Amino acid sequence: AQSVTQLDSHVSVSEGTPVLLRCNYSSSYSPSLFWYVQHPNKGLQLLLKYTSAATLVKGINGFEAEFKKSETSFHLTKPSAHMSDAAEYFCVVSDYYNQGGKLIFGQGTELSVKP
Amino acid sequence: AAGVIQSPRHLIKEKRETATLKCYPIPRHDTVYWYQQGPGQDPQFLISFYEKMQSDKGSIPDRFSAQQFSDYHSELNMSSLELGDSALYFCASSLEGTSLSGELFFGEGSRLTVL
């Protein structure tokens, strides 16, 4: 079965410092992986996606993630945090051949950004 | 660009009442998904429809039912509401031919509060 584990429930950084949100996945087939962001009382917005093309994926707002099959990881990074990055981040896996387009969400990581 | 539209955005009901949530997918999208996100929880898959037929079923209670109509909009009907049904309900849509990549487009959600 496919699953996603986000290793940190809460991450706090200072504005201007790097961001690292960790995610490990489990999938029996070649997965598609995503990072979604959810601001308070808002919907889910796609940050970036990996679909078996380039392993380093660039997304919106300066975020990027690297797919590492050997480590079954898909960590999200950003070189310099901004106050507006404070939100909940979800690592998500989809395995079309086993579960259609259904997405399986990780538990979420709350990112706090201090001035 | 048109996005996924959900209505109502907020809904307050009493226990044992019924509620109906509506979802209007992105034009030409033929697949609709429903997710439930409880307070502080990650989104949980409820049910999905492709071309007006149920395509997959997740952790949807028997008290809930859903359908997709000929214009591809979907409705989630919830009866005998319980306090634990209080949550943010997301609808997402995709186009079947592109769902191989697993990318779903989410609405902003309908927040149901059961008193």
Image (cartoon, rainbow, N blue to C red):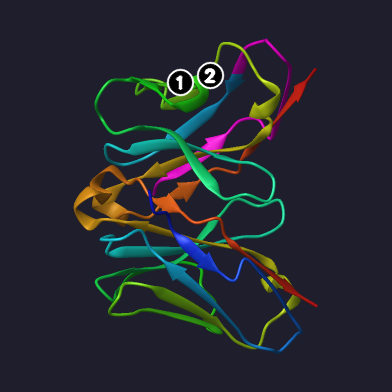
Point 64% across, 28% down: residue: A85
Q: Nearer the viewer, residue B17 or A84?
A: A84
Q: Subunit of mark 1? A: A
Task: Give, as a three-letter code, the residue at label 2.
Answer: Thr
| Contact (Cβ within 8 Å) of mark 1 with mark 2 | yes
Q: Subunit of mark 2? A: A
Asked if residue B2 is among those painted magenta in the image, a careful observer would answer no
Residue A8 position within the rendered picture, expressed as x and y whole percent measured from the top left = 66, 30
Residue B20 tag number: none
On screen, residue B18 above or below B23 = below
Q: Nearer the viewer, residue A95 or A112?
A: A112
Residue B55 position within the rendered picture, expressed as x and y whole percent measured from the top left = 30, 69
Highlighted magenta segment, given as a residue range: A1-19
> Is tag 1's residue or tag 2's residue first in the polypeptide sequence?
1
Question: Where is mark 1, residue-wise?
Answer: A64
Q: Secondary structure at mark 2?
A: strand
Q: Nearer the viewer, residue A28 or B33?
A: B33
Residue B40 position within the rendered picture, expressed as x and y whole percent measured from the top left = 71, 51
Q: Residue furthest left?
A: B97
Q: Secondary structure at mark 1?
A: strand
Residue A10 position within the rendered picture, expressed as x and y whole percent measured from the top left = 71, 31
Residue A19 picture quarter: top right
Question: Where is mark 2, residue-wise?
Answer: A77
